[in-house]
Image (tube, grey):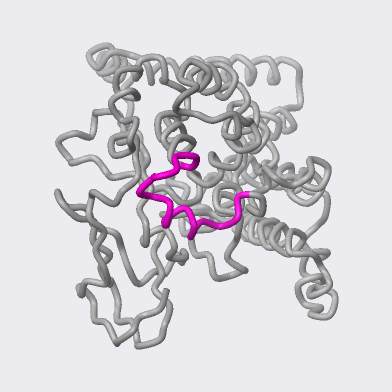
Amino acid sequence: MVARETVQPGELLFTVPRAALLSQHTCSISELLERERGALQSQSGWVPLLLALLHELQAPASPWSPYFALWPELGHLKHPMFWPEEERRRLLQGTGVPEAVEKDLANIRSEYYSIVLPFMEAHPHLFSPRVRSLELYHQLVALVMAYSFQEPLEEEDDEKEPNPPLMVPAADILNHLPDHNANLEYSPNYLRMVATKPIPKGHEIFNTYGQMANWQLIHMYGFVEPYPDNTDDTADIQMVTVREAALQGTKAEAERLLLLERWDYLCKLEMVLCMPTEEFREIKDQDGWGDDEREEDSLTMTNIPKLKESWRQLLRDSVLLTLQTYATDLKTEQDLLSNKEVYTKLSWREQQALQVRYGQKMILHQLLELTS
């Protein structure tokens, strides 16, 4: 979508009436979904919306039929969950995407057979046989992942469950940029797309999907930002990798056993997340948490070179182990990106995966420089 006229910050681009939103509360089976809410609870929290989509897709007189006509072809979605498993593992090894996709696929299958299909079979007059399909459900999950919106909670409601996802016609066709020029605002009767920067006439309007690293963009939306355009890109170092790096640095058996004991203690601290507030505060006060915190010990880019030598060594070893999880090294990626003739011959998936790997490796190599 492009601006028809030059737009200034704060100007309204378009509105979407709440009556036009497609959600579990606005679909034609909303009362049934509300009655059966307890039976439709799932890990994702998306089942009611997905059932609404399954019903409206096959309803002859659905008011959202014109909206569905604007959807991308469901059989041509580009998420890695639709790539062949071998290709996904080969191209995205080390990025964290294959593991995330495998978890998604397992959850989708479990959710479909344990909740969604039994619900549709219990209401055959609302769901024709053509929508009782794991493949279609899989596609709709990817669509909701990429195109739905989630209305933020009010500050006073921040302890409540998150709002369910909803489909917002018009707003969901805007592309994403970290340096976006528009933002969706919520009000009681309308949703408003408002300019956040000057947008010259004929220039594209960009929304933001949030602070998304490239591995998250390819996983959830099926695209990436080419390096170095994604200012929100990240590279993850797994805690198990930090453990392995720490063990690698031990010299004696007693030192190794002490480290494992410390690690076990650290893992037990995860129980803190489930503690009642008073119990947490009591333990925090007893242990004196925060007494020795120093600004120079924080893991910011400017402070990493100032860390204790042992800390920098642990971080460096963790980075080196993380780099070993990729199938290729940084120079291989640089050679591909710098050779335009070779790069243009890569498939779309190969190009996207290359951008994910390269961005992560650049961050990791920057960390190596800071810890040397």
The one of 262 and 268 positioned closer to us in this rendering: 268
Q: Up-down: is 117 above or below 144?
A: above
> In the image, what residue occupies the spot 46% across and 24% down?
125
Chain part drawn in magenta: 57-74
- Residue 50 in the image: x percent, y percent? 46, 35
Q: Up-down: is 73 above or below 59?
A: below
- Residue 41 in the image: x percent, y percent? 41, 20
The one of 267 and 224 positioned closer to us in this rendering: 224
Q: Up-down: is 363 above or below 38?
A: below
Tell me: 321 left or right of 242.
right
> In the image, what residue occupies the spot 64% across and 26% down?
106
- Residue 97 in the image: x percent, y percent? 66, 44
Name the quarter where the C terminus is drawn: bottom right
Image quarter of residue 12:
bottom left
> In the image, what residue occupies the spot 81% across and 67% down?
346
Q: Is residue 116 magenta?
A: no
Q: Taken as a whole, is the magenta stretch helix, strand or loop?
A: loop
Q: Up-down: is 41 above or below 215?
A: above
Image quarter of residue 81:
top right
- Residue 341 in the image: x percent, y percent? 84, 80
Q: Is residue 69 magenta?
A: yes
Name the quarter where the N terminus is drawn: bottom left
How many marks are shown on the rendered structure? 0
The one of 295 and 338 positioned closer to us in this rendering: 338
> In the image, what residue occupies the spot 24% across and 49% down?
19
Tell me: 149 left or right of 302.
left
Tell me: 225 left or right of 151.
right
